[in-house]
Image (cartoon, grey):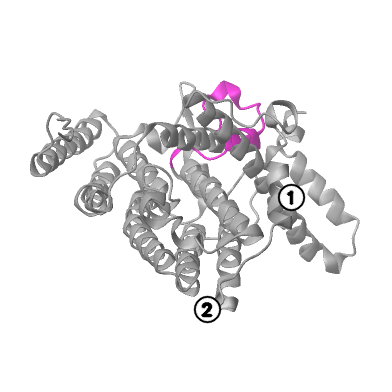
Amino acid sequence: MIETADQIFVLLKQWVVGLLPAGLQPVAGVLLSVVAIIAVFPTLFALAVWVERKALGRMQNRIGPNRVGPLGILQPVADGIKSLTKEDIVPLSADAAVHFLAPVVLVVAVFMGFAVLPMGRNMELVDMDAGLLFFFAMGASTELSVFMAGWSSRNKYSLLGAMRAVAQMISYEVVLLLSSAAVVMITGSLSLVKIVEAQNHYTWGLPHWYIFTPWGCAGFVMYAIAATAETNRSPFDLPEGESELVAGYHTEYSGFKFALFFLGEYLAMFSISGLGTTLFLGGWSAPFSFLGWVPSWIWFFAKVMLSIVVFIWMRGTLPRLRQDQLMNFAWKFVLPLTMLNLLVAGLWRFLGDGWERWVVCSAILVLAFAVMGREGMRREHFGPRRYRYAE
């Protein structure tokens, strides 16, 4: 019974495919998986939008959506209908073809990343030996779509927003790649399925997730920072800084094309949260051995949704950084620590089992964080805030 609940979607797919002729079964299996991904994640997107609007409303002492459906639960549906029926305005001087393709490229690239994520035991669309490389290759395409949107709009604000977004995404993508490289060093594989299997072990009921190691904890923190910047979420939402850029690279977009950008941003959050779950949080494995009876896909989506809640929490609590602060933070603090973490992961791998590697690796990371943090604060001359008012 437990095994059936865990593999319910796999068994259902096999039953449906088995009804078809043998020649059509491989294609039908892929199409069913694609349809499932296209159905599940936009549904989660609608739910996440409602949760974010209600949560931010509570943080800001507002009610939030409360008119359409119970507690405003149908507000995402109303917004979708409005986006579909709203007039699509394209500037006369814009490059119409590129202007149209930009949001489409963004959404397609993000959906492609879901193909290699193991969302449960035996629940991955494609088990590639280089699945991690494929994921990052698809993620890099989002930068192209952002630049396409800004350049094709023939709007200086859009172009500036696109350039800022590309500079930010490239800077933090380096951190994203290097923080993931530590996991590859320890696992010895680029396959996301094998990375999850390497963490699906228990000692005294506790999991062997990489986040519970010194290098894994540091790598996860760096990955989370870079993931927040990659998805343009607060406090790294500078490409959409309304105070200086109107709405950034999608200023000239309206109607359904703007909704596609909104959808792509949220799907990127799900995608990058799923990768972080796979790399550092054991993927679909249970947090304790005695909870192994819970279906694996429930654990995966629970971890992803918890990550989304953290994204929402940060948006409601942290102020936006300046552009120079954001870039300095990437190149002068996060990137050096991430590179040091690669050395620490190598030491962890070759020091062997024992308490010595825990002490050595932890000491290196804590000392480096303390020294670099203190030196960075000294250079920036941080001190008590002084409030001055006009005479």
Marks 1/2 in contact by CB < 8 Å: the verdict is: no
Q: Residue at image x 12%, y 32%?
A: 383
User: Which is more foreground, mark 1 or mark 2?
Assistant: 2
Residue 120, placed above or below residue 155: above
> Is residue 250 visible to us here?
yes
Q: Residue at image x 39%, y 52%?
A: 184
| Residue 17: image location, x then y, percent | 84, 56
Q: Quadrant of the N terminus?
A: top right
| Residue 357: image location, x then y, percent | 23, 35
Q: CA distance from mark 1 to mark 2?
A: 28 Å
> How many residues crowd mark 1 within 10 Å: few (<14), some (14–19), many (20+)?
few
Q: Which residue is mark 1?
A: 81
- Camera-side residue of 364 and 86: 86
Mark 2 secondary-structure assignment: loop
| Residue 217: image location, x then y, percent | 34, 36
Residue 320, placed above or below residue 256: above
- Camera-side residue of 336 and 45: 45
> How many residues crowd mark 2 within 10 Å: few (<14), some (14–19), many (20+)?
few
Mark 1 secondary-structure assignment: helix
Answer with left or right where residue 153 lies relative to residue 72.
left
Labels 1 and 2: the sequence-earlier one = 1
Residue 50, placed above or below residue 61: below
What is the magenta range? 280-302
Instruction: Name the kind of residue labelled 2 in the image.
Output: Ser
Q: Residue at image x 58%, y 21%?
A: 290
Q: How many marks?
A: 2
Answer with left or right where residue 152 lies relative to residue 314.
right
Q: Which residue is mark 2?
A: 93
